[in-house]
Image (cartoon, helix red, strand yellow):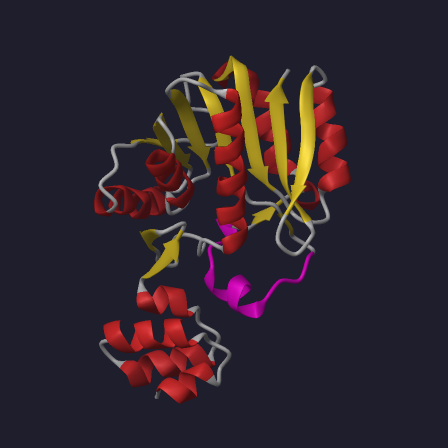
Amino acid sequence: MLDKIIKLGISKREAEELIKVSNNLDEDYEKLLLNYPIQYLIGYVNFYGNKIYVNNSVLIPRYETEYLIEKTILYCKKIFNKKIKVLDLCTGSGAIGISLKKELNCDVTISDISKLALAVANKNCKENNVNINIIESDLLDNINDKYDLIISNPPYINKKMKIMPSVYKYEPHLALFADEEGIYYYRKIFEQIKKNIKEKFILAFEIGYEQKDTLNSLAKNYFSDCKIFFEKDLNNKYRYLFIISE
């Protein structure tokens, strides 16, 4: 069975993990033939060195987001020399907030509009033994504190864009797609966020690789007195937006 699973384009490590945890391997194999994500069958992923539980209520954390965390940690250590307050907005599984809590001297709040996602995030906080504040909120509506760092991987896929069938069919559309050609949630966050940031702050976002120019113009409308810049992922595509107070 291992070879059969690997022939579907699945890594040996993931195939071995599925075989180890599966209650019905034949049934799981049939799901894989239908492009069902193996991460949901296994029930967890390794993300930034942490075991993060996933189901189809949350997006499967990806390596691009690990790189966002890595870059954000570097900027935080460069800019802050104190314990900081962090908000992970649109948290999904909680992977970003949990990773930052373990790597930085910080208090972390995670939030999401989805009750089902927050149930997964709550489980991940407990399993990773981190003390994190959890808030159900439509973006910043229920967020009242001010933060040194707000980080977010919001829905940003243009609804007209074609994506991998396995992602479109099985991962939650609420966490994937956004109006205004994928820009809607960034605009809403920019409109709301001033009430939730301290005088000295970092905003960090994962973005679509084709959104750099549009987001640059949008960010300048709201943060004209800040440093606005973009970073590339390992595929040399602009995938991260940083806004830092001057």
In percent of width and height, residue 7 lies at 48, 85
In percent of width and height, residue 94 lies at 37, 43
Asked whether 3 falls inside the magenta stretch, the response is: no
Quarter holding the C terminus is: top right
Q: Quadrant of residue 96?
A: top left
Q: Quadrant of residue 217?
A: top right
Note whether residue 22 is visible: no
Magenta stretch prevailing secondary structure:
helix
What residue appears at the point 36 percent right and 85 percent down from the top-left corner?
2
Quarter holding the N terminus is: bottom left
Left or right side of 219 for 125: left
Q: Nearer the viewer, residue 225 or 188?
A: 225
Left or right side of 212 for 154: left
Q: Is residue 211 above or below residue 58?
A: above
Q: Is residue 213 above or below residue 50?
A: above
Q: Is residue 18 above or below residue 234?
A: below
Left or right side of 193 for 3: left
- Give the total of numbered labels: 0
Q: Quadrant of residue 142?
A: top left
Q: Nearer the viewer, residue 21 or 119?
A: 21
Q: Nearer the viewer, residue 237 or 25?
A: 237
What residue appears at the point 64 percent right and 30 percent down from the top-left corner?
187
In percent of width and height, residue 141 lies at 46, 24
Note whether residue 44 is visible: yes
Q: Nearer the viewer, residue 215 or 51?
A: 51
What residue appears at the point 37 percent right and 57 percent down from the top-left corner?
46
In percent of width and height, residue 100 lies at 40, 36
What residue appears at the point 25 percent right and 80 percent down from the top-left corner?
24
Asked whether 165 falls inside the magenta stretch, the response is: yes
Q: Residue furthest top?
A: 199
Which segment did they paint magenta? 161-175
